[in-house]
Image: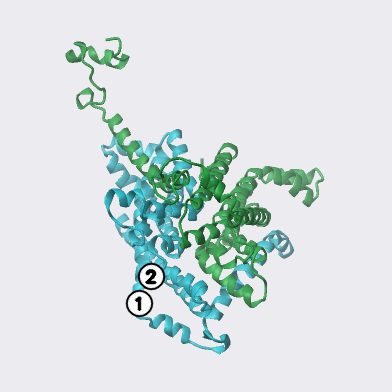
Amino acid sequence: MSLVGSESTALSVDDPIAFAGEHRPVSSPGAGRKNRPGRKVSVGIVLLLVLLFQLLPLIVVVDSSFTSAATLSFPGKGFSTKWFSVAFSNEAFLSGIRASLLLGVLTAIVATAIGTLAGMAIGMRSDKRILRSGFWLYLLTVPLLLPPLVTGLGSLQFWSHMDVGLGLMVLVPGHLVLTLPYSVRIMAVSFSQVDPNIPSAAETLGAGRARVGWRVLLPLVRGGIVASLALTFLLSFDDVAVSLFLKSATFVPLPVVIFSYITQSISPDISAVSAVVAAGSVVLLVIVQKTIGLDHLFGIER
Amino acid sequence: MGRRFLVSSLPLLPALALYAVAFVAPLLFLVYTSTQRFSAVHGIYGGWSTGTYRSVLGASDIGQVVFRTVWTAFVVVVISLVIGMGVAILFRFGSSVTRLIIMLGVIGPLLISSVVRTFGWVLFFGPGGIFEHVTGLKLLNTSIANIVGLVNLFVALVVLAVLPSLSRIQQSEVDAAATLGLSKIGIVCRVIVPMAVPGMISGGVIVFGAASGAVISPFLLGGSTFGVLPVRVFSEALELANPPAAAAFAILLVCVSLVVVVTFEKGVRSLWLKWDR
């Protein structure tokens, strides 16, 4: 009887079978009129299935990267970390990582700078000229209407025609077009939440326009800036469609390297480098969640 | 007012300048390229020509390619809407733990490399993968693998698109419906979903655009010769080195998805208005 929890003891008062010491689960049909626990379980199972579906490809990649066999399989055979050392002695992967990091950081900084300016122009006037600021916000998100593939192809043909060499110098503008819409949206929302009395108070106290912007407004939208930096970096790091067209022979972002390796031959070192990319993204996501919250990044209202 | 307006619009200039150079000009040039004479020997040489469009639109399989592009994206939209709505409802009315799990496990993967995730499906469906081992089905290089991969990439976009509509539904409205005797399924079908229709439309449009324009997933999961427009753009541009044909396919892709999206949006909106009455 001591093993039976307090809920069952409470039940046992008007339940002769339980009173006799037989354990009956609380959620059985006879336990009560409420079917909440059962429904909760089924909702939980559905959520678990969706989670499994969303995370399955990542699980596969991570699992297969630890294989000790020479060919890829899922589930992987044995356990070894040798493919990580193989991957990290492959110059193609290493230069791909360097290229993607450089491209991602440059894109994030420039997109956030331009996005902060545009977001300020849109967000700060939202009180009086809603129509016009709505128009600008819409206009600045137009690049999202086209597949990145189309932007990438157009850029390739345009820059080649202008005799501009491919590589970093054209990849940055290409990725800016992909990421700026998100930065503008985040910053416009951040600026629209600033109390308009604060900058005007600062102006009354004698601060110039530049000083108000730098010392008063920027600290107020710090969360938006961090969100914009993180989002634009991750989007740039994720892109394949534009990079595929604008890469040069010596500057190939990592996703393109991975893509071309997959199309040639599949071996466990691709899994290893992919697992590292996924792990890096997860770490960044967790940091964002801990600092400003992912809902801020995705524009979800709390 | 004129001067003030100019000053307050000044911060928009860098963004507009960037778009002019890196977005508008390339797109106009794409249209230009597609109308230029081209031969495999001479490359692009002077003069206008409708030859590219005639050969692209006159190809015997073009109807099939367009249909497969639209159909695949449509199936992805439908599946994503069903799963995404479910997840969004759980997110809106769930506990903070549920929210955190969904945020990290369902929405978070949006920002994890799509080529890595697609590679995961290649391993899952491919030879040596658990799926073929257990079921005996060879799904790699089929539409099904492609659709699974695309839903995995884009389902979270539906969640993000419908959440603003769902957050407008008050808990008190749901409680009222329950008090009036609606079952949980009834509440979902007759209270929550109708209010989420605007979000579902925009989510559907976003996923349609993303799925019809995706190139990595069809190339790796559908096969390198998988007959959809983005793969055609890719192979004409980078494998066959035919810029005008690649440009023409890209423009066709944009036109097709534009026509479908506008028709779909109008159709669904008018249906919804009728149903609402």
B41 vs A189, nearest the viewer: B41
Mark 2 near mark 1, Cβ–Cβ under 8 Å? yes
Image spot of residue A276 (x, y percent):
54, 46
Q: Which residue is mark 2?
A: B227
- State which chain disc 1 sits on: B
Q: Can residue B37 be seen? A: no
Gap between marks 2 and 1 measured at Cα: 9 Å
Q: Position of residue A201 (x, y in %)?
A: 74, 43
What scheme was used to colour the molecule?
Answer: by chain
Q: Is residue B254 above or below residue A34?
A: below
Name the one closer to the observer, A204 or A207.
Answer: A207
Looking at the picture, how far across and down is residue B262, in whole percent?
41, 67
Residue at 57% in and 60% down = A178
In the image, farthest residue toward the left = A16
Pick the residue in front: B82 or B275: B82
- Identify the residue shown where x is 42% and y is 84%: B55
Residue farthest along the right direction in this orientation: A206
Left or right position of A111 against A41: right
Residue B46's tag is none
Mark 1 secondary-structure assignment: loop
> For mark 1, what is the residue?
B61
| Camera sees residue B146 | yes
- Find numbered disc 2 in the image and state the secondary structure of the residue it sits on: loop
Chain B drawn in what color?
cyan
Chain letter, colour green: A
Residue B95 vertical position relative to residue B25 in the rendered view, above or below: above
